[in-house]
Amino acid sequence: MSPERATEALTRCCGCARWVRDMVAARPFASDDAVHAAADRLWGSATPSEVLEALTHHPEIGADLASLRARFASTAGWSGAEQAALGHADEQTLLALRDGNLEYKAKFGFIFVVCATGKSAAQMLELLQARLPGDRETELRNAAREQQAITHLRLIKLADE
């Protein structure tokens, strides 16, 4: 894979430009395990501003009900597949996710992010409600940890393409 193509592919995994640049420079990798180890090592040095940069590449869970319903009618994109459980949520849960996400963003200044794979909308709502009382520093750490989990899932998907 050319450096340009690798940059494009890795940006789909994590939206932090420094992480992508460093991952491209670290190639070639001897194994999938080596890719994941490098991803962890490089993400481990992410600054708060780099975490926030990565979050800009995620859709807001439940932010707009009309787009949420449309988005999750199809799971063509990785985010859609990761959040596909939202497509089966009842209206009350969707409304609570939207409202909770708006409250979260107003409080912390960034979107709520969770590794949604395998979680129902109700489970994501529970996680959102559990994290809302926290402080910004803790939530930045939570967001970094969730981004790391999402990145690993996307690296696996990338390898399978």
Image (cartoon, grey):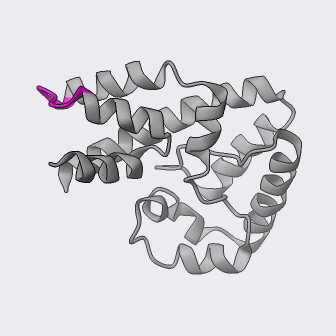
Residue 2 in the figure: left or right of residue 107? left
Residue 108 in the figure: left or right of residue 18? right
Q: Residue at x 60, y 34 (%)?
A: 51
Tell whether position 10 is magenta: no
Q: Residue at x 58, y 33 (%)?
A: 50
Question: Where on the picture, by quarter, is residue 46?
Answer: top right
Residue 21 in the figure: left or right of residue 84? left
Q: Relative to 149, say whether 73 is above or below.
A: below
Expressed as whole percent of the image width and height from the top left, the position of residue 62 reads 70, 63
Of 7 and 63, which appears nearest the observer?
Answer: 7
Residue 53 in the figure: left or right of residue 76? right
Q: Relative to 32, say whether 40 is above or below.
A: above
Expressed as whole percent of the image width and height from the top left, the position of residue 17 reads 47, 40
Q: Residue at x 41, y 23 (%)?
A: 42
Residue 114 appears in the figure? no
Residue 57 appears in the figure? yes
Of 103 and 47, which appears nearest the observer?
Answer: 47
Of 33 and 88, which appears nearest the observer?
Answer: 33
Question: Where on the picture, by quarter, is residue 78?
Answer: bottom left
Question: Where on the picture, by quarter, is residue 59?
Answer: bottom right
Q: Relative to 52, say whether 46 is above or below.
A: above
Expressed as whole percent of the image width and height from the top left, the position of residue 113 reads 63, 45
Q: Start and end of the magenta stretch?
A: 26-32
Quarter of the figure with the C terminus: bottom left
Q: Residue at x 42, y 40 (%)?
A: 151
* Count of number-bearing discs: 0
Expressed as whole percent of the image width and height from the top left, the position of residue 25 reads 27, 30
**Could you tell me what secondary structure mostly forms the magenta stretch?**
loop
